[in-house]
Each structure stands twice: as C-alpha cells, then as structure tokens.
Image (cartoon, rainbow, N blue to C red):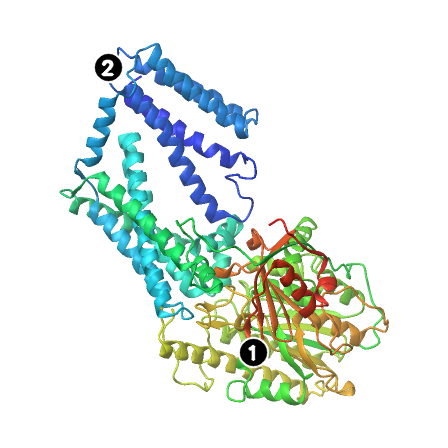
C-alpha cells in the first residue's frame, strides 16, 4: 500500500479517534467533552478541536515513521501496525468495552509501543541535539505564510471588539481604553495560536486535506460577523445562540425564524449560507495568492502570541485593583473568549435549591363555578410598560385608569412568548415548562390541564390568533391536538384566509370574524383567547391606520451601532405598531358594548413580555431579565357588578389564573399556585421571572419585590429546566447595587427583602458555603 494512502488512513483514523470521547460521552473525573443536551454550539467547537488534536497526534506519528530511510526503518510495517492497533481500539470504544481513562490508556500504550518499537527494533533515529537545532533553525527561518488572511482576521477581531466596547455605555472612558488594549492583546494571541494550529494541521495532514482545513478556517470571519450581529440584536454571543437553538431548533429552523419575525425558508437560509461560505473561501484563496511572496519566521509569531497573552494578563491583573466588580463582570459577559487567567469571581453567593412544583390542576378535575362570565384574554405582543401612555395607547391608557383593576408595576414570568404564555395559563414558574412539554409529548399532546379543567367546569374554549402556533410547540403543547379541550382553534396556517398576509391584514380578518361569532353566541361560559401580533419585530400596522409618529425608522434591519436618533426612530416605529394594537383593542371592546356583553364580561389585555431598544445594549427581547423586557401591563376588567377590584402595587402574570379562579369558584380552598389572587391579597409580594435566554448576562432568574431585585444563574440554564444549585449574580436595591461583605450576608438579605419567595417558589433554598 503506498505511503500516501497509509498516511491518509492514519490521519483519518486519528481524526475519528479524537471525536470518539465526545460521541461516546466519556468522562474524566468531573470533566467531559460531552456537555449534555442544549449545548449545540459548544459541541461543534469541541468536535472540531478534538478532531484537530486526534488527527495531528496520529498524523505526526505517521510523519515521523516515514522520515529518514523509509525502507530500512520498515516505516510501512509500523504504519500498518498502528492502523491495525487504532482499528482495534475504536470498535472496543464504540461497544463501551474501552471508555474514559481506559480508552486513553490503550491509545497511549499503542503510541508508546510504536514509537519505542520503531526506535529499538527498526533503529528509527530518535531526535538528536542536531535535529533539535534544526527545529530552532526552522523556527527562525522566514517561511511563506498567508499573511493577508491573518492580518485581515486580526483587524476584523479588533473591529468586532472595539464596536462592542463602544456600545458598553456604562463604562468610563479610561475603562474602555484599558479594555481595548486588553482585547487587542487577546486577539494577537488568538490569531497567533490559530496560525500554529493551521500550521500543525497542514504539516501533519495529507496534502489533499489542506483545502478542507482552509475551508473550515475560512468560516471564522463569518462567525465573527454573526457574533457581532447577535450581540447587537439579541445581546448574546453567536455561541449562546447556537446553544439555545439546539438540534431541535436546527431541524425546525424555519419555525425559529418565523417565531423571530424573519420570513425566510430553509432553502433561502441554505442558499444565503452557501453563497456566503463560498464567498469567504474565495476571499481566503485570494489572500493566499496575494501572500505568496510574504515571508515570516515562526519565531516572530511565537513572540507575538506570547506578548499578546502576557499583555492581556497584565491588564487584567492591574484592572482588578481599580475596576468595579460589576463592570469587570460585564467584560467577561460581553466577550466569550478570555485568555487571561486573572478573572473576576463568578457570583456573590451560591445556593443549593429545589424548585417547588405547583400541582394544582388535572385533566380530570373540575370546579363548581358560582359565576360563568365570558372571559376575553388578548395578548398584545412585546408590550412595554412605558408604552401605556395617552399619546401611544389612548384607549388602553384610559382603560387602565378607569375600568381595569388598579395595578402598579406588572412583571411577566419570562422574556419569551412560549415561556410567558405557559406561566400565565398554568400559574407555574416557567422552569416547569420543559418537563410539562415532555409529558405532553409522551401523551400525544392533550393540551394543558388548566384548559381541560375549564372545559370540565362548563366553559367553551376558543383561540383566534393571527400568529402561527408551531413555535416551540406552543400550539400542540398548550392547545392540544386531537383531544384538545378547545372547540375552535384558528391560527395562521395554510388554507386559512389569513395565510400569506401581513400581521395587520391578518388581524383585521381574525377580529372581524371573531366579533361576528361573539355577536351570534349566547352570553356567558366562553373563554376566548386572541392575540395582537403587529408589535412583534418588524413592527407593523395597517396601511389605512393613521400613525401617531410619522417620523419612524424606514429600514427593515436595525443598525449594529445606532445613534440616539436611530434609536428614537426605531422606538417610534414600535410605538406606531402598539398604537395599531390599541386601535384593535378599542374596536373589540366597542363591539362588546354595542351588543351589550361588555359589562358582564371579564376583559383582559396583557403583554407577553417587553421589548428593549438599546436600553442595555441590545434590541428586542429574549436577551435579559432587565425591566424593559419583563415589565409589561396586565389590564383586567372584572364584571361591572364587582367593581374594579382592590388596588395592588405590584403583580405578576402568574397571578392571573389564581385571580380568575378566585372570582369564578364557589369553593374557598387555597390552590397550590405560584401566583397569588389579586382579589384577596393586595399586600407586597415577591414576583419571579425565569428564562432560558439570558443573553450576555446568562442570568436565568429574577426575584423582585418593592424595588429590590435579585438575579441568579445556573449551569446550562439555557435548557429551560430547573437546577439543583443557583448562583446569585447581582443584588440590586432602589438606589443601585447592594454590596455586602460575605455570602452569609447576602443570604440573610434575601430572606429579609424576599420573605415570601422561599416558601412559594422553592422547597429548599440553602446557602452553599463550599463554593
């Protein structure tokens, strides 16, 4: 067998050897290359790194065996022996006979036997002092390199970092300058390390592998630009986006795009991606042509790499003495890759916890209702608290002032629609949603128990929406499939009159049809859910609607570095869409008044979450638990016979279902809900918001009460499931950050300022002093 084929087989076998620990879920103490579900992006990087390590190790051994006198040293025999040895180890690993340390031990033994055997038996020369001197000469000898590519990559990385730093408005100018120096050093080291990684891969790989290696590296600039876009729009890294997306999201990527307001098909995305990748590969090839005569000694690149690493470390070591902890943490949240070993302490207190399950509902359960008014629940997409003004939403503002229950600040249960709806309907913390979906999937999607409860208690359930409910299985999970408790399910699907139209056009049709249906059905006993979706990005309104803000942002996509004027115009565009929603709400209520059904009905208008406009460095939602994303109005008009209801200073969307059931039920027993009835308890209460999409902050849980806020995170929070341990990342009061001396002090402060939280939301919440 020719040497080139043997070398290629060994290189490919080494590549396979490298990725086996990932796919077989090997673990080494507490470390494992497989990080668990919902780490799609991290797993891509891990597989590429493991493949590079494995192919380099066994490719280098193959190169060494073939060096010198190929025949005299029996290189082919030793290469065949190595290949046979590897293909003895690999099947044993696939059948889990060799795993974890035994897998590495077997491979190490094979490597040692081949290296020692080739040296002792076949007298293959071992490295001598003279050969080591040749290595030094190789390091100091100028060599051709793709200089234009690496210089352009470094410039792109620096531009990416400087753009992000300029958008960090909370940092002082001196902090930004220091951070720019640190990031330049970091990118010098990173670019130098990438150079040597490519060099080793090319030197030890077969010749035919070089175009593939360069093709993979050519994708790096694309990832850098995508990362900047993700920072700018969703305040998260591209890696976090891929982790949140997961394999299920990748398979159903068209649903994810539609859920995010992007009208692209899978074929369209693949076409754009293929074009961009081919273009990037072409640019890399052009750089290599331009750099054919460029020469540089590897030793200089080594020195630059060391200099970059040292500079970044020195900046961080000095900065730890004068940077505030919050701003220092902001650096590490903003940039996913940090080379310096000097880092801020992660978290200010650690707790062992058990989230409480609120099992208050069952499919087979029913209540004895003393009232059965019609209930109309209308979700207004992305409704910020500060959008409720006489100028933007004159009807809803007046509705809140004179007709709905007087509620002050209202907190959503999450910053994303699917989580917010789940908690609103079930009065369960949003971390329970993934398990609920698992159970629903296993039972062929029966619909939420709470809706079966309403049906069993005599209510007719309907949903009329201009949106498509396939995003994150919202339709089948909440509404159900064949055995759905809903008598009417209307959504924007193929075959419906709304299909293919814009949101405002759909809403006109849906609400006109809904009003006609309400006009013909008997009063009482109907629970109807509808939505106003035009305020979702891309913020639209009907062409015949007179907008309150004629000066708005005219472009489809937002700028990555917006000016204050850009932000004002974009907010105006959003406010115009909210104003259109206000118009629909007014028209809907007027119809109820015209047919005499308004006074006796419960009418609810509420947001699913808020919306950010560079308030904390990002756009839209699903990127943080800051006020702009999790404060959203909940306007509840009770039947006229009971009045407006008691005044409540602060409430949660978790409180809606307990409040409805408190009004409807004849029983006076307490339900095990996460929320509290707004009709009985108007005193202070702790509100909880959780998310699987915390953006750069990685904060997954927020507790709020009377101006105090506690933010928490935990490992793999982005899978949407509860954790057995949480880390307190920030503790904020009405005057700003609260800085205490010890974790014990923070634990005591949590008990003081959130006294009801730990019995309502947890069965265990204990300080972990071992962290």
Q: Which mark is residue 533?
A: none
When asked about the image quadrant of residue 668, the answer is bottom right
Q: Is residue 118 visible?
A: yes
For the residues bearing labels 1 and 2, Cβ distance under 8 angstroms? no
Quadrant containing the N terminus is top left
Q: Residue at x 24, y 53 (%)?
A: 152
Quadrant location of residue 117? Answer: top left
Establish if 488 lies above or below 96.
Answer: below
Real-space Cα separation, disc 1 to disc 2, in angstroms: 78 Å
Residues packed near mark 2 inside 10 Å, few (<14), some (14 to 19) or many (20 plus):
few
Depth order, front residue of 532/325: 325
**Residue 219 visible in the displayed image:** no
Q: Position of residue 553 (x, y in %)?
A: 38, 77
Q: Earlier in the sequence, mark 1 or mark 2?
A: 2
Residue 380 or 301: which is nearer the viewer?
301
Of all residues, the one furthest to the left in this rendering is 293
Q: In this figure, which residue is indicated by the disc labeled 2?
A: 69
Determine the residue positioned at 80% across, 59% down: 364
The residue at 53%/43% (across/down) is 35
Quarter-wise, where is residue 651 in the image? bottom right
Label 1 vs label 2, nearer the camera: 2
Q: Is residue 613 above or below residue 9?
A: below
Q: Relative to 17, is 445 above or below? A: below
Left or right: where 171 falls relative to 143: right
Q: Is residue 131 left or right of residue 692?
A: left
Q: Which residue is mark 1?
A: 385
**How far across and how far down the image is residue 721, in percent?**
62, 54
Which of 361/21 is in front?
21
- Residue occupying image coordinates x 17% and y 35%: 141
């Amino acid at each position: 067998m020719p040497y080139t084929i043997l070398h290629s087989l060994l290189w490919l076998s080494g590549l396979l050897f490298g990725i086996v620990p990932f796919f077989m879920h090997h673990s080494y103490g507490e470390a494992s290359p497989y990080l668990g579900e919902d780490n799609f992006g991290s797993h891509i990087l891990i597989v590429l790194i493991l493949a590079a390590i494995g192919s380099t190790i066994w490719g280098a051994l193959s190169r060494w065996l073939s060096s010198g006198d190929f025949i005299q040293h029996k290189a082919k025999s030793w290469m065949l022996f190595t290949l046979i040895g590897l293909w003895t180890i690999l099947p044993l690993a696939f059948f889990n006979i060799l795993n974890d340390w035994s897998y590495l031990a077997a491979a190490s033994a094979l490597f040692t036997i081949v290296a020692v055997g080739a040296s002792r038996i076949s007298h293959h020369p071992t490295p001598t002092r003279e050969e080591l001197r040749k290595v030094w000469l190789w390091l100091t000898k100028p060599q051709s390199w793709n200089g234009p590519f690496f210089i352009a990559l470094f410039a792109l990385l620096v531009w990416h970092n400087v753009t992000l730093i300029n958008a960090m408005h909370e940092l002082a100018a001196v902090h930004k300058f220091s951070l720019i120096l640190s990031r330049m050093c970091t990118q010098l080291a990173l670019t130098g390390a990438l150079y040597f990684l490519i060099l080793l891969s090319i030197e030890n790989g077969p010749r035919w592998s070089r175009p593939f290696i360069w093709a993979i590296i050519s994708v790096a600039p694309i990832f850098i630009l995508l990362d900047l876009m993700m920072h700018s729009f969703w305040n998260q890294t591209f890696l976090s986006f891929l982790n949140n997306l997961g394999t299920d999201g990748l398979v159903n990527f068209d649903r994810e795009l539609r859920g995010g307001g992007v009208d692209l098909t899978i074929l369209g995305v693949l076409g754009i991606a293929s074009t961009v990748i081919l273009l990037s590969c072409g640019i890399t090839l052009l750089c290599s042509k331009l750099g054919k005569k460029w020469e540089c000694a590897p030793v200089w690149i080594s020195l630059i790499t060391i200099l970059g690493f040292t500079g970044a470390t020195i900046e961080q070591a000095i900065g730890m003495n004068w940077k505030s902890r919050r701003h220092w943490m902001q650096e590490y949240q903003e940039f996913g890759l940090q080379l310096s070993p000097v880092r801020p302490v992660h978290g200010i207190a650690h707790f062992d916890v058990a989230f409480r399950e609120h099992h208050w509902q069952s499919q087979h359960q029913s209540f004895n209702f003393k009232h059965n008014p019609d209930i109309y629940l209308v979700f207004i997409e992305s409704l910020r608290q500060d959008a409720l003004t006489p100028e933007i939403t004159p009807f809803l503002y007046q509705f809140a002032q004179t007709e709905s229950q007087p509620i002050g600040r209202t907190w959503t249960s999450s910053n994303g629609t699917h989580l917010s709806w789940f908690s609103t309907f079930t009065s369960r913390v949003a971390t329970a949603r993934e398990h609920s979906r698992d159970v629903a999937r296993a039972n062929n999607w029966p619909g939420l128990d709470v809706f079966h409860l309403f049906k069993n208690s005599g209510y007719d359930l309907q949903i009329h929406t201009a949106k498509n409910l396939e995003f994150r299985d919202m339709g089948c999970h909440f509404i159900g499939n064949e055995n759905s408790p809903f008598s009417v399910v209307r959504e924007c699907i193929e075959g419906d009159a709304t299909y293919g139209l814009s949101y405002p056009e759909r809403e006109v049709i849906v609400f006109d049809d809904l009003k006609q249906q309400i006009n013909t059905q008997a009063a009482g006993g109907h629970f109807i859910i509808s939505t106003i979706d035009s305020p979702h990005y891309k913020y639209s309104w009907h062409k015949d609607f007179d907008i309150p803000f004629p000066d708005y942002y005219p472009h489809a996509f937002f700028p990555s570095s917006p000016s204050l004027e850009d932000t004002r115009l974009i907010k105006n565009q959003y406010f115009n869409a909210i104003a259109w929603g206000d118009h629909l709400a007014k028209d809907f209520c007027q119809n109820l008044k015209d047919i005499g059904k308004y006074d006796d009905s419960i009418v609810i208008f509420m947001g699913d979450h808020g919306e950010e406009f560079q308030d904390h460095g990002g756009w839209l939602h699903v990127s943080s638990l800051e006020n702009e994303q999790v404060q959203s109005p909940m306007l509840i008009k009770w039947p006229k016979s009971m009045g407006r209801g008691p005044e409540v200073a602060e409430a949660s969307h978790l409180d809606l279902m307990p409040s409805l059931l408190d009004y409807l039920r004849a029983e006076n027993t307490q339900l095990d809900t996460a929320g509290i009835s707004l009709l009985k308890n108007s005193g202070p209460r702790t509100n909880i918001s959780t998310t699987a999409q915390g953006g750069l902050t990685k904060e997954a849980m927020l507790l709020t009460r009377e101006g105090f806020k506690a933010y928490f995170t935990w490992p793999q929070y982005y899978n949407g499931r509860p954790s057995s341990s949480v880390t307190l990342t920030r503790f904020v009061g009405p005057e700003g950050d609260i800085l205490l001396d010890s974790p014990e002090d923070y634990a005591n402060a949590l008990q003081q300022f959130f006294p009801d939280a730990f019995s309502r939301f947890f069965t265990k919440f204990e300080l972990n002093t071992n962290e």
